[in-house]
Image (cartoon, grey):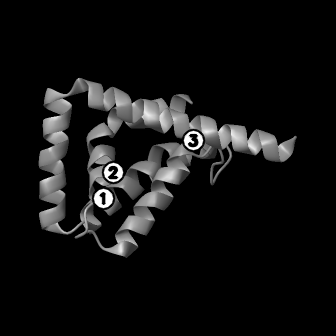
Amino acid sequence: MGRLLGVLRLFRHDILVMLLSLKSRQTPRKVKGMMLLAIFYLLSPIDLIPDAIPVFGMLDDAVLVPAAIAMLMRMLPYPVRSDCERQANYILRHAKLAGILVTVFLLAWVGVIVWGIYKLIS
């Protein structure tokens, strides 16, 4: 949970741009699919490298997630990216409630995923 909150704080602008670009019709489907995979990996409690492994366990948190976000931001077509960045700036500047709602939405997804895994296990 700490990993998720830390990443949300550091990359809230980029994550908001990604979410806004998902609804844009000009975003290529390949990029949308990769963004959805990145968001689900970020929300997933399962890591590529388990956190129990010293030093390397934090590698995906410190390197892979920021690299994936940066790569996906570069893959967005310029008109889509500039429009979504303008919208994200407006939302973050004028509507703090939207940032809170996005965070609550993402935390709700984490709860649903954890609940689903719990139901599968038990």
Per the rendering, the mark at residue 58 is 3
| Residue 81 pos. (x, y %) | 18, 59
Q: Amino acid at mark 3?
A: Met
| Residue 65 pos. (x, y %) | 45, 50
Horizontal side of 81 relative to 22 (left or right) equals left
At mark 1, the secondary structure is loop
C-alpha distance separating marks 1 and 2: 7 Å
C-alpha distance separating marks 3 and 2: 25 Å
Q: Name which quarter of the figure residue 67 lies in.
A: bottom left
C-alpha distance separating marks 1 and 3: 32 Å
| Residue found at the very far right of the displayed protein | 122
Q: Which residue is mark 2?
A: 19
Horizontal side of 113 relative to 4 (left or right) equals right
Per the rendering, the mark at residue 105 is none
For image coordinates 41% across by 57% down, the residue present is 68
At mark 2, the secondary structure is helix
Quarter of the image with the C terminus is: top right
Per the rendering, the mark at residue 23 is 1
| Residue 9 pos. (x, y %) | 36, 31
At label 1, counting other C-alpha atoms closer than 10 Å, the crowd grade (few under 14, some 14-19, many 20 or more) is few
Q: Amino acid at mark 2?
A: Leu
For image coordinates 29% across by 44% down, the residue present is 16
